[in-house]
Amino acid sequence: MRNAIISAGLLCFGASCSGDTMDLTGDDEIHEYDTTAQVDVEPLVIGDTGDDIVAAHAFFMRYGYFENAALSAEYPDWIAIAGKPPADDSVFGAELERALLSFQSSYGLPVTGTLDAQTQELISKPRCGVPDSNLRSDLPGNGGNSLPLTTNEAVIDKWAPQIAPQFSIPFRSVHAVTYSVGTIPAGFINGTTGTTWVRATLEAALSTAFNRWRIRGTTVLSDLTFTKVASGASIPITFVSFPAGSTALAQADGSSLKFNVAFAFEETSTSGGFDLETVAAHEMGHSLGFGHSSVVNTAAAEAVMGAVTNVGEKNSALTPDDLQILAVSPYTNWAGVTGSIAEATDIGSSVVGGVEDTWMLGTGTNSEGFKIFRWNDLIGWQQFTGGGVRIDVRGDRPWVITNAGLAKRLDAGNNWVNQGDCNFKDIGASASVVWAVGGTPLGGDYPVYRYNGATGTACVVNGSGSWLSTGGFGKYIDVAPDGSPWVVQSDGSIYHLEGVTGAVPTGTTWTFYSGLAKDIAVGSDTFGNVGSVWITGNPGQSQAIYQLNIQPGVDFDGNGNNSGSSDSLPRNQWFAPANGGLATFITVGRDALPWVVTNNGSAYRRR
């Protein structure tokens, strides 16, 4: 028998833990995994036995990996990830290996299928008590239309919902959440002051936490509203004593939110307790019907809906991963733009200083293509001179491809300047760089070029610019915030050029992404260097709209990449938003939310 150490400090919040857990109230201390002391512990493998195997089985039973009648009763939409539990929970068998493979893949760990030190560290950390789950594809707005695009089938679908909200109807344009704040007992201590929470301070913290799901800075992100009422609330908030020995910080079930008075919640994040805003924002996410994100990063970057939390951690601000769940949820919807342009053929958008700048082609033609329009929130569409067949925006300046294959940009004097003639077919831009596809086709695809100012030799036009070939081919193109291009080929295949830097402007490697697309767009809200990537599906997918969610690889061996044997590899899924609709062309504007052009030429933006 081989044994490794699993910390006894298993915390949960979001729902009461089932099974026996250490009582962390009173004199017991919170134990966290000591990576320095345990990194050399030999992993436990199939055939091993002992108390640590029993503890691992209990963890995976409690958090949704094995079939569990208690969880099924509490969360009707929950589906066990790894199937039936083992007959003997003291023996490491195929059942535990299956759960470990799923857990490791979903949480960015090396996928070893063994109970290794890194896995032990993560399962020992405080986390939410709402279980992880497989995805119910028949529920609206939960990503149920996500494409099965990972080669590893043993993964948790991102954001699988466990709670059906009581206060919202899917596909409504407005979602009004009301909440009430019950009596604050003397035993509910503000850990920052050491005294009972003052109602005004508590309510202000709750309001701030809840409105994270609606407002980012001064930008309204969703149709959600949160209103405090005296009675009749859709979510009553109470402060109660949980069952003796419970380690749950709070519990949300879609119709109520309860805080455990045994814990001191703090106004500010310190090393000694749990931040009230962080817990409240997470629990409201569950009340909205959101399940867990599987993003596990540093405390500063971890998603609000991440299952794991830490003492002293404050992450109540939405991360890009949280923004993505909001972007595909029923709480954002498509709004038709007043004065939509007939026969619209392409659209491009950028964000400068928080201001969205959107351009579109349509409503008749001229000698260079379709007419060019710019959107202004106050006056609608304004027509500009010139014409084109494809458009994108760098900063507040559009670039177009004309029907003669020229690449032109609009200068500060509103004059169109010819920047290249490579028989261009599409163009993509970020704040720093412009890429295009054009030249001599290979099948239905064209070489990929990067605009490089006045240097280089490829496709020089009038001595004013040059385009450097990168070796890739595509039909449609867009550019990530780091300056790297994404392309869609004529067969719908999707590729991203890695390794683009100032020193290596043409990149190093084209990486294939599963899925099929017609058009692709990349926004400025980043997950790593990738940005927020959206596609319109190819005709075989009825031109549905999808958003890419990436779980990045982890460089566990510290060699600067995630290709080592001990590292975890990235994985990705495409999620169709609720109220998804169909579109032909797409761009991404403010807050990683897209604009689209439909096949009848109408323009819509998601808000």
Image (cartoon, rainbow, N blue to C red):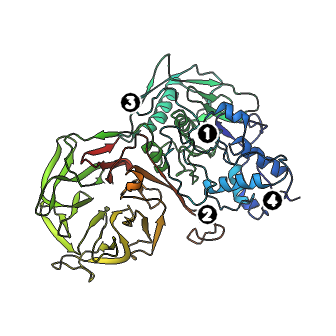
Task: Categorize mark 4 by other alpha carbons within 10 Å: few (<14), some (14-19), many (20+).
Answer: some
- Of marks 2 and 4, which one's residue comes earlier in the chain? 4
Q: Is residue 348 left or right of residue 112?
A: left
Percent across and percent down for residue 514 are 49, 61
* Label 1: element kind: strand
Q: Which mark is residue 274?
A: 1
The correct choice, above or below, for 548 with respect to 333 in the image is below
Q: Quadrant of the C terminus?
A: top left
Can residue 534 be seen in this snapshot? no
Percent across and percent down for residue 533 are 41, 56
- Of marks 3 and 4, which one's residue comes earlier in the chain? 4
What amino acid type is highlighted by mark number 3?
Val
Image quarter for residue 564? bottom right
Nearer the observer, 247 or 488: 488
Q: Is residue 295 left or right of residue 491?
A: right
- Residue assigned mark 3: 174
- Residue assigned mark 4: 46
Q: Nearer the viewer, mark 2 or mark 4?
A: 4
Percent across and percent down for residue 339 are 19, 41
Task: Categorize mark 3 by other alpha carbons within 10 Å: few (<14), some (14-19), many (20+).
Answer: some
